[in-house]
Structures are given as structure tokens and as C-alpha cells.
Amino acid sequence: MNADLRGVLDGAPIAHLATLLPDGAPHSVPLWIGTHGDHIAILTGPGSQKARNLRRDPRVAISLTPPDNPFHPITLRGQVVEWITGDAAWEIVDAIAQKYIGAPYGRDEERVVALIQPSNAMSNRP
């Protein structure tokens, strides 16, 4: 992951994650995103549609734009290489939430973290 991409991911872009439903149809959702080591980190509920999709088929496509430059879209592809649960997941979830809302994430629902190994990234500057 290059420094420019890490800088965008460590900011607060709204990303869109595309996964595959059981019938092969696309499923896309907006989400918060961050980094953990050399991986892209996303949070989700353990029983959410995206978690079920990713456990069955770990391939993803992600699109996002930096909040300060909406004319600089970035697209990524990769796959989930690890799931983190428990206290370790909450540390990552809280770090991501801090970027977006300036506070830890609420504890009213269980959350897990999927770590994604990017296989390619494209920046489409106008």
C-alpha cells in the first residue's frame, strides 16, 4: 500500500464495498474504512449480509473518494485475509470510529473486523 493510498484510507472517506450475493449478484454498501498494518480494515456485524458474503467469497471491490477531493476517485480490489473478533476487533473499530465521529463506537451491537489484502489500486485523476 503506497503512502498516498494510506493517507486517503487513514482519513475519513465514505467507501463503497462490493461483494457477491449467493446467486452471484452484486451487493454494494457504504461503510467506514481504515488501515491496520498493511491491510484495509472494515467493520461490520458478524451476521450482516456483507459478512456472510465475505465468509463465502472473500473477494471485494471498493470505491471511495477523498472528502477533500471528490474528483479523485480511487478503486481497489482485494480479498479478506483475516477476521478479527473480541477486544482486538474493538480496538480497531474504535480507531476507525474516532476518525469519523470523534468517539469510540457504541457497544449496543457486536462488531467484527475484516482485514483486506489489496491486490490492486487505481487512482483516476481527472
Image: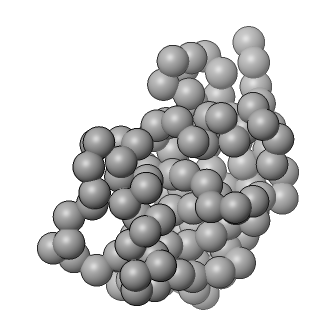
Residue 46 placement, left or right of 110: right
- The answer to whether one can see residue 60 in this image is no
Displayed quadrant of residue 121: top right
Please name whichever residue, 66 or 84, is drawn nearer the observer in this view of the structure: 84
User: Split into 4 quadrants, where in the image is the C terminus?
Assistant: top right
Which residue is rendered at x = 15% and y = 73% of the image? 108
Residue at x-position 78% and y-position 37%: 3
Q: How is the image coloured?
A: one colour
Give the total of numbered labels: 0
Q: Residue 115 at x, y = what percent?
A: 62, 70
* Horizontal relation, residue 66 to residue 50: left or right: right
Q: Is residue 7 visible?
A: yes
Q: Residue furthest left?
A: 108
Report the residue at 62% width, 61% height from top.
36
Above or below: residue 32 compared with residue 59: above
Residue 5 percent across, percent down from the top left:
72, 38
Report x, y in % for residue 18.
57, 58
| Residue 69 percent coordinates (x, y) | 56, 17
Residue 66's image quarter?
A: top right
Outermost residue toward the top in this view: 126
Q: Residue at coordinates 43% horizontally, 55% vertically from top-left?
A: 95
